[in-house]
Structure formats: C-alpha cells, structure tokens
Amino acid sequence: MKLTFPEQLIREPIVYTLGKRFDVVTNIRRADVREDTGWIVMEVTGTEQRLDEARRHLESLGVRVDDLEAYLE
C-alpha cells in the first residue's frame, strides 16, 4: 500500500503504531518524508480483519491509503 501523510502527521509514529496496535507486519519498500509532506510505499501482512482495521484507522487519521497494485501497473 502507499500511504500519503498530511503535514500534521509527518512526525507521528504511524507505521510503528500499525504493528503494535493491529498486529500486522510492515515492510517499507520506498519512502520520501520531508518537513511538510511524506509518503511511504510498504507491504503490510496480517489477517484480513486486522488489515481492514489498520486501513480504517489510517484513513480516520487523515492518511491517504492507496493499494500498491495501482502503482505497479
């Protein structure tokens, strides 16, 4: 998945929280994080239920979540 962060979340430990709170495994493949913008392309594995919960959590924070497959085509 690709995560795009709004400026106010750049310094928050979003990826760490996903692993701890939702029991998913994250593997960062690419990232570009700057002072006012940031994105991360990462693999996330876990049960379907936990992945859905993690995605909903990210979106509720204001993180844009795009499926990775869209960037591989």
Image (spheres, grey):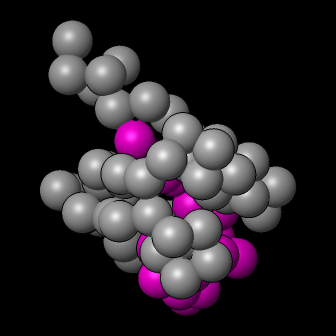
The residue lying toward the viewer, choosing from 35 and 21, is 21
Q: Is residue 62 above or below residue 52?
A: below
Residue 71 at x, y percent in the picture: 28, 25
**Residue 61 percent coordinates (x, y):** 77, 63
Residue 8 inside the magenta-drawn segment:
yes
Instruction: Please check the rendered image and state whether residue 32 is part of the magenta-colored stretch, yes or no.
Output: no
**Residue 45 pos. (x, y %):** 36, 51
For the N terminus, the image quarter is top left
Asked if residue 36 can be seen in this view, the reply is no
From where the camera sits, is residue 44 visible? yes
**Total count of labels:** 0
The residue that appears at 49% across and 47% down in the rendered structure is 47
Q: Is residue 65 left or right of residue 67?
A: right
Q: Is residue 45 left or right of residue 6?
A: left
* Residue located farthest toward the top when viewing the structure as drawn: 73
Residue 34 in which image quadrant: bottom left
Q: Which residues are magenta?
A: 1-17
Q: Position of residue 2 (x, y in %)?
A: 41, 44
Which is nearer the eye, 9 or 59? 59
Residue placed furthest toward the right = 60
Q: Residue at x 31, y 22 (%)?
A: 69
Q: Quadrant of residue 10?
A: bottom right
| Quadrant the C terminus occupies | top left
Q: Is residue 6 above or below residue 69?
A: below
The residue drawn where x is 47% and y is 82% is 16
The residue nearer to you, when weighing 37 against 9, is: 9
Is 23 placed left or right of 12 in the picture?
left
